[in-house]
Image (cartoon, grey):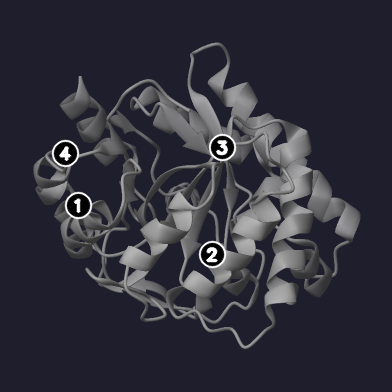
Amino acid sequence: MVAAGPHAIDGGLASELERRGHDLADTLWSARILADQPAEIRAVHESYIAAGARVIVTASYQVSRDGFAAAGRSSASADDALRSSVRIARDAVGGRGVLVAASVGPYGAILHDGSEYRGRYGVSRERLIDFHAERLRVLAEAGPDALAIETIPDVDEIDALLEALAEVPHLPAWLTVTCADPAHTSAGQPLAEVMVAGGESTQIVAVGVNCTAPDNVAGALGQLAAAGDLPLIAYPNAGGDWDPDRGWLGAAEGRAVDLIDEWCGMPRLALLGGCCGVGPQTIRQISDRFG
């Protein structure tokens, strides 16, 4: 997917939109900006490219037919937004050799209750497969360089996702999970199970964690590294606790900065960046660290 790393990837999208003055307090979250103000999405991508990111993650995390329907929008408009997310990222990249990874967020993102940090949605495996497969097909048609299967809280959802992923066999993907602590997914399964699941798919090129507290990263990567041979990836948030009504509470981007050197020393680290609350300034520090 990229030349031998480690390399910097981008940081938080929604938190940067908020820093630019956007109110994301609705069910579509950043997907509303993607659909209605695409130039703002491009501006955030460009800020991360300028900071040295070698991989840009698209704004498709929150986009789904179900989510758009619940907000009074059509299924066709959801598919258009998925395609647009890839096109906008491509336009931002230009000819600079930066890769575009299409974000594939969890089913929990459409529930708007913090389920991406708990898992165990109470829906069938078939429901999860269908939900992810329809999005993956549209994203694959848009032509990203890779898929960013991210913020997944539950090994059961990973199982469903990997079955859906097999329907677009030409695309490589990375797989990152949220975790309850340095050894377990948000749903409580050992992180070793994530590496084992990723290793069973020929399309998964890296496994790791994202949108988890910075203090969890080193331990989580160690657990994953001990369970398999795939390269590792991490893009933590700025810490704090997620409240569905009030957003991130107690986040402090400086904690991620404090731990960059420790993370960069992890074996098999391929990609390092940030998630919610981590902005271009921190990505610049990561990029500079890699040279």
Q: CA distance from mark 1 to mark 4?
A: 12 Å
Q: Secondary structure at mark 4?
A: helix
Q: Please tell me whether mark 1 or mark 4 is closer to you in this view.
A: 4
Q: Earlier in the sequence, mark 3 or mark 4?
A: 3
Q: CA distance from mark 2 to mark 3?
A: 15 Å
Q: For mark 4, what is the residue?
A: 264
- Amino acid type of disc 4? Cys
- Amino acid type of disc 1? Ala
- Above/below status of 245 relative to 220: below
Q: Say if residue 36 shows up in the picture.
A: no
Q: Please tell me whether mark 2 or mark 1 is closer to you in this view.
A: 2
Mark 2 surroundings within 10 Å by alpha-carbon count, few (fewer than 14), some (14 through 19), many (20 or more): many
- In front here: 49 or 154? 154
Q: For mark 2, what is the residue?
A: 158
- Amino acid type of disc 3? Pro
Q: Position of residue 123 (x, y in %)?
A: 67, 84
Q: For mark 1, what is the residue?
A: 256
Q: Earlier in the sequence, mark 2 or mark 1?
A: 2
Quadrant of res 107: bottom right
